[in-house]
Image: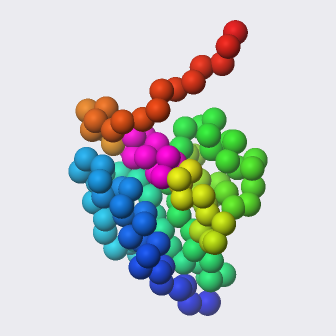
Amino acid sequence: MADRPDVPDWMVRRIGRVLNALPECREESAWVGTRWRVRDATVAHVFGGEDLLFRVTFRAEQDEVMALQHLGDPYFRASWGRNVVGLLLDDGTDWEELRELLTDSYCLQAPNHLAELVPRPPQQTPDT
């Protein structure tokens, strides 16, 4: 089995700047890489794969899971959990979009009273 690379510190710090600022979200070492949790729920997990690529996984609403899955590379649907998706991190990563996805993941995983403290853009509804 190939060794997994350590996630570069700058990637962990960049993701941490988003998640560590959210109420009761904490950073901790995971079985591989680093994860962020609110209470007992994992919000995001960044790690190096055996293919030497770096990934971050997070939670998303079901319609978002389907949309990201169909977009394909650099997005992927995780093989565990029905609402777990991920993103390959590289030079082309859209860090602002990742910030939004991580914030959404937090709001899905956090208790309602904590999620309500997080400013988010208003949900757009389709015109009928």
Quadrant containing the N terminus is: bottom right
At 38% from the left and 70% from the top, the residue drawn is 13
What stretch of residues is rendered in magenta?
Answer: 99-109
Left or right of residue 67: residue 20: left
Q: Main secondary structure of the magenta part?
A: helix
**Residue 80 seen in render:** no
Up the image or down, 127 lies above or below 47; here it is: above
Quadrant containing the C terminus is: top right
| Picture quadrant of residue 4 | bottom right
> Is residue 90 in the magenta section?
no
Q: Position of residue 30 (x, y in %)?
A: 38, 72
Q: Position of residue 79 (x, y in %)?
A: 62, 58
Left or right of residue 66: residue 22: left
**Residue 10 seen in render:** yes
| Picture quadrant of residue 27 | bottom left
- Give the total number of marks visible in the rendering: 0
At 61% from the left and 90% from the top, the residue drawn is 2
> Is residue 104 in the magenta section?
yes
Q: Position of residue 92 (x, y in %)?
A: 66, 66
